[in-house]
Amino acid sequence: MTKFDCTTPVVMTLSNHDPSGSAGIQAAIETTASLGCHCTAVITALCAKDTRDLKELVAIDAPLLIEQARAVLEDMPVRAIEVGFTGSVENVEAVHSILRDYPDIPLILNPVTSFCNSDLLDAPAVVGAIQNLLMPLATIATADLVEAHQLAQQADNIDACAHEILESGCQYLLISGTRRDQNCFENSLYGHQGLIKRYSKRRLNVFSHGCGATLATAIAAYLAHGLRLEDAVEQGQNFTWHSLAASRRLGMGNRIPNRMYWADRNHSDIDPTGGA
């Protein structure tokens, strides 16, 4: 019987390659490494993108996506799977076919509907495929407020959004930015019983690209370490907040999260809740 080194949890991420290093696969690799996990990166799409705009998008062929994922899943003890941008309806279907064979591995779904605003793909079809095929398999879905409304277009308030999305079958839903003012930014965790908890963070006066990818992967990493879901959600938000607080402007567009903030001597250990 094969003996595995279980001291380093393995997290699989299926997402796009972002050459600017802001989001997608690089965000997942940096986040998992920072949190003591090993990332197995499955590429779903190739992008031409800088820190400002998406310029070109080419989805990986579905058979190659399947081959990438199954090669790892048949070789390594994956403890959590995070799915980000898939690139096409065919790739959503391919991911669904893989996930059905591994129902016991927690699935963290980052729907990334912001990409679907691009005219580079059939947006309504991709969103519909995510709702119908991936949401029912998700342990937890993470979405910002805009994504939540895109996924629940009949809903007229945040709680109704959560209810509609959870009806698709995912077990939990974390919506970012459910309330915000000049000083505070609030996220809300929902389950089938309704609102579970609100998380309040000090609002940052910077805008960084890659927040959603960082948050979803951080939750996956903490679940892979064996934390309870609510603890993984809380710790994942703390990690993301610190990564954004230490973000850097490396190009002419948005800032990039510093997911290795703890190794930066210039980063101060600030309380994200605003406490002393």
Image (cartoon, rainbow, N blue to C red):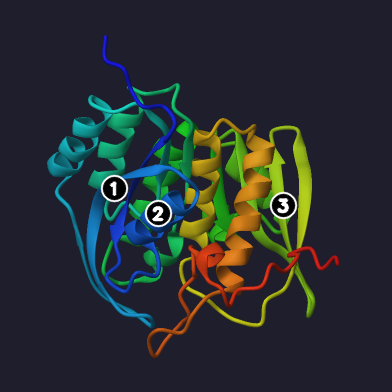
Q: Earlier in the sequence, mark 3 or mark 2?
A: 2
Are the two marked residues, 1 and 2, in contact with CB atoms closer than 8 angstroms?
yes
Quick one: label 1, few (<14), some, or many (20+) residues within 10 Å? many
Residue 71 relative to residue 148: left or right: left
Residue 186 lies left or right of residue 228; in this view the side is right
What residue is drawn where x is 46% and y is 58%? 213
Residue type at the position of mark 1: Ala
Q: In which quarter of the image is the C terminus?
A: bottom right
Q: Position of residue 45 (x, y in %)?
A: 23, 57
Evaluate whether residue 177 shows in this view: yes
Q: In the rendered image, which residue does mark 3 sit on? A: 188
The residue positioned 41% from the left and 48% from the top of the image is 128
**Which residue sits at x=64%, y=45%?**
233
Q: Which of marks 1 and 2 is nearer the N terminus?
A: 2
Q: Where is residue 62 in the image (x, y as percent from the top left)?
A: 17, 43
The amino acid beneath tag 3 is Ser
Residue nearest the viewer, comparing 216 with 264: 264
Sequence order check: which comes first, mark 1 or mark 3?
A: 1
Say which residue label 2 marks. Answer: 28
Q: State the image coordinates of residue 80 (x, y, percent, origin top left).
A: 44, 35
271 is higher (above) or lower (below) than 266: above
Distance from Cα at disc 1 to Cα at disc 2: 8 Å
What amino acid is labelled 2 in the image?
Ala
State how far apart marks 1 and 3 are (Cα): 29 Å
- Observer able to see residue 145: no
Rendered view: 236 above or below 185:
above
Name the residue tied to disc 1: 41
Q: Element under label 2?
A: helix
